[in-house]
Amino acid sequence: MLALALPAALGCAVAAPRQAAIPASGHDAVVVAQLFRPCGRCVTAPVLGALRASAFAPLPHAHVVATVLPDHDRVGRTFDAEPWETEALRLQGHLFGGATSWPSRGSYRESDADGRIGQERLILEQTRMVVSFASESDFSATALRALADFLTRFKNATGQDSVALMIDGQLYLR
């Protein structure tokens, strides 16, 4: 797994993700975000000297914000997620100074309209993850409300059981 191999290559351990400035949801932090949160020793590791010698420098950021956009609704019907991905890129770029997306795959157990998990039907789907590295000044209640509003619209318009937002390794579901 890349999340575990990268710190080992740098000769140090990954620090625990910082808590976001919003209430904890009770869900476990995810390992993926740790890729973006190396410990303090990583930044000064000798192996990174090759990057510094090539004029690369770390970009200071305070928070990692990621949205996950699937292409299936709660009963497994496929829809076009590209317009939503484009809107998320524009919104997160505006709110946090930039955003990057990439395709991924996901799975979840189907549930009914009330969120109750029924028969064990597993839905496999293509997803898009949109990630921003936000400065402390860009990371605000107003920005998080705008992102929450977007995800709520996405959930309702595409028939999702829930939507996911990751902040500094903490997963939030609605």
Image: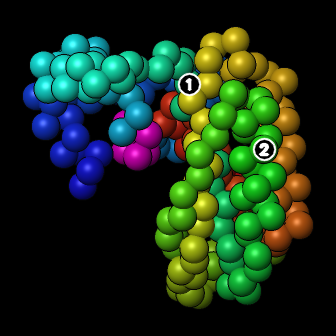
Is 38 rendered above or below residue 126? above
Task: Identify the residue under disc 1.
Answer: 63
The residue drawn where x is 53% and y is 80% is 124
Residue 173 position in % (x across, y down):
66, 49
Pointers 2 and 1 in contact (C-beta within 8 Å): no
Give the magenta range.
30-34
Which sits earlier in the primary sequence, circle 2 or circle 1? Answer: 1
**In front: 126, or 77?**
126
Numbered badge on residue 90: 2
Q: Quadrant of residue 34?
A: top left
Q: Quick one: quadrant of the N terminus?
A: bottom left
The residue drawn where x is 22% and y is 40% is 6
Q: Quadrant of residue 96?
A: top right
**In front: 63, or 45?**
45
Which amino acid type is shown beneath numbered disc 2? Arg
Q: Is residue 96 visible?
A: yes
The residue drawn where x is 69% and y is 77% is 72
Residue 40 position in % (x across, y down):
28, 15
**In front: 123, or 32?**
32
Mark 1 packing: few (<14 Cα in 10 Å), some, or many (20+)? many
Which amino acid type is shown beneath numbered disc 1? His
Mark 2 packing: few (<14 Cα in 10 Å), some, or many (20+)? some
The residue drawn where x is 89% and y is 67% is 157
Say what secondary structure mark 1 lies in.
strand
Residue 156 position in % (x across, y down):
87, 63
Say what secondary structure mark 2 lies in.
helix
